[in-house]
Image (tube, rainbow, N blue to C red):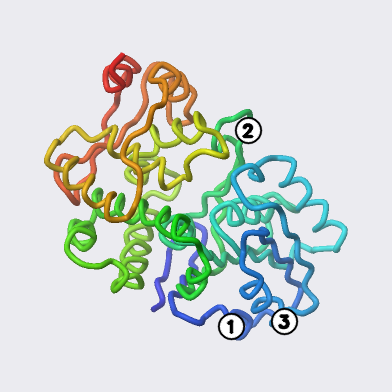
Amino acid sequence: MIINVHTKDREYPVYLERGILKRVKEITGRQGHVFIVSDDGVDPVWRKCLQDQYPDAPVHIFPNGEASKNLTVWSEILEDMLEHHVSRKDTVIALGGGVAGDMAGFAAATYMRGIHYINIPTTTISQIDSSIGGKTAVDLAGRKNSVGAFWQPDAVFVDPDTLSTLTPRHFNNGLAEAVKEGLIRDGELFELFERDDWRDHLDEIIGRCLIIKRDIVERDEREGGERKLLNFGHTFGHAYETYYGLDGYYHGECVAMGMMTILENEEIRTRLAAVLDRLHLPKTNDADPAEIAKLIRNDKKADHDTVTMVQVHEIGHGILEEWTMADVERKLGL
């Protein structure tokens, strides 16, 4: 399956196919001059598969996890690129989850004012959500994604076989984003999680999510309007993520709890709770409401005393609402 993405400045293909990781060089036609960025959470079998195709390519590996998404690691990647004489004509390849995509993409966007970039997501959450759209960012002073750039890749290679080496928790973590996309745009996708064993439909789930993301990004690349719908559950979710720190909940788990927090339609909340139970994802937490409110006030989506929230009153149809901080505090029971 090939999904073509058309943005204002670039058109690129997203390849969704089992085993395609073995054919990256064959498909791109790039003969060397590649710099690979990965993290140590990627199973060595997948890194070897890529390195076998580019035996002369330098590989920069950083520690897995959100703790690495910072300006220090970004700077280390850039310095390594300089030491290996990466030029403006060369290509950065990201191999890993969302953090690897962020770090490699942001490095490619800023190195020599921008060079070629290919994204190879190897986790559920990155294949479903972050591989399309060109968002690259690092965290700063405890605030998620505060420094970054929009930098579209030249191509994306989505190989569901790479998900086979994930732990169950990491696997399920990414499915929260698929549930989110079903709630805001694709009712049939959400119902699939209610009705069937999602394991029998994994490739379909990834494909449907990629198409949803593609369609939204093409209409709103820079998140001026419609693309904000993809933030459903994320305002509260990011606050939970920061509150509990790097050893707490994963991103998708926080999004799951964020969706449960924001939803006001009790029927949809009940249906979502059942789906999250099936996926072994959390629904509630014991975070201090006052601290969560403070974190939301500092969220990059906040504008002084207001913040754009995403709400779902009908499954498959997300809407944008402007909330005051008083509304946020009310929702948190303050």
Residue 31 tag number:
3
- x%, y% of residue 67? 64, 42
- x%, y% of residue 104? 65, 56
Q: Amino acid at mark 3?
A: Gln
The reply to whether dot 3 and dot 1 touch (C-beta < 8 Å) is no
Q: Amino acid at mark 1?
A: Lys
**Residue at the image position 61 percent from the left and 56 percent from the top:** 100
Distance (Cα) linking label 3 and label 1 = 15 Å
With 149 as the anchor, is 48 left or right in this view? right
Distance (Cα) linking label 2 and label 1 = 36 Å
Residue 22 tag number:
1
Disc nearer the start of the sequence (3/2): 3
Element under disc 2: strand
Q: Is residue 75 above or below residue 132?
A: above
The quarter of the picture where residue 257 lies is top left
Q: Nearer the viewer, mark 3 or mark 2?
A: 2
Q: Residues within 10 Å of mark 3 (few under 14, many from 20)?
A: few
- x%, y% of residue 153? 56, 62
Q: Is residue 262 above or below residue 62?
A: above
Please name the residue that numbered disc 2 is placed on: 140
Q: Is residue 87 above or below residue 114?
A: below
